[in-house]
Amino acid sequence: LFTGGADFLKGVVAMDGLPPADRIEVCFAGRSNVGKSTLINALTGRKGLARASNTPGRTQEINFFTLGDNHYLVDLPGYGFAEAPLPVVQRWQELLRTYLAGRATLRRAFVLIDARHGVKKADEEIMTLLDQSAVTFQAVLTKADKVKEKDRARILDQVRERLSKHPAAFPEMVLTSSEKGIGIDTLRAIIATLP
Ligand code: GTP
Ligand code: MG
């Protein structure tokens, strides 16, 4: 699907640090600990590429990765990290807002949602921000391996219902498990075929 390997390019803390907008770009947003970095590792097939950790809020920069010769994968800082001081949170929100609104090559955002918990308040906030920024987004349910079969339909229904309220949301969602490799090929195919 992608010609060439995958690599870490750079971590960005301010708009003037962004790499040139010369590739198709997708970004990954989601609450701290939802599995953004782990998903990027799974998509690229490189386990240690995006740092995944058990410590929430560890990814404090907008991290750019190259995938093949034509794509950037962008790991956004986790939101809903209540322990961060307010000025830090506000600075990140401002950077995020500016990035989302102004990045011409950003084709799609993936909003990661823990498949055990469904859509939370912080997820609503990022989805509203994406609506306002006119960035098409698609929900990716993570940690599917941890969902009990009996809970699955109810959670999928809740997410579907919430997505229907957001004009920038894609109706189809992707159920994934980075641990078990579920949905990873589907997501790779979605990224590879973005117009
Ligand atoms: P921040 O960078 O803090 O925003 O977190 P993150 O969204 O990047 O989460 P990260 O990828 O670091 O994963 C958090 C924890 O969830 C780690 O312990 C992962 O091993 C675990 N995890 C991620 N994906 C899966 C999955 O598909 N299944 C299971 N069971 N655990 C997962
Ligand atoms: Mg991370």
Image (cartoon, rainbow, N blue to C red):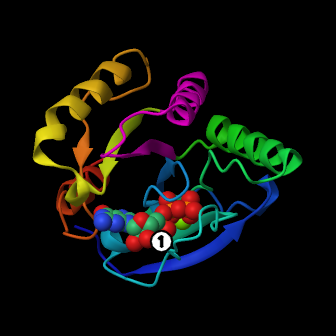
Of residues 128 and 101, the one nearer the viewer is: 128
Percent from the top left, x then y, of residue 83? Answer: 74, 53
The residue sitting at 17% across, 61% down in the picture is 182
Res. 14 visible in picture:
yes
Q: Quadrant of the C terminus?
A: top left
Closer to the camera in the image, 69 or 56: 56
Tell me which residue sits at (57%, 35%) in the image. Answer: 122
| Left or right: residue 24 compared with residue 75 | left
User: Where in the figure is residue 28, as x and y percent of width and height?
Assistant: 48, 52
Residue 60: image quadrant is bottom right
Q: Which residue is mark 1?
A: 66
| View extreme (left): residue | 149
Q: What is the tally of numbered marks visible in this picture?
A: 1
Q: Residue at x 26, y 38 (%)?
A: 173
Residue 125 drawn above or below residue 62: above
Camera-side residue: 119 or 166?
Answer: 119
- Quadrant (top left, top right, bottom left, bottom right) of the N terminus: bottom left
Classify 12 as above or below 93: below
The residue type indicated by label 1 comes to Thr
Direction right: furthest residue: 87
Q: Is residue 170 above or below residue 80?
A: above
Magenta stretch holds residue 163:
no
Magenta-tinted stretch: 106-135
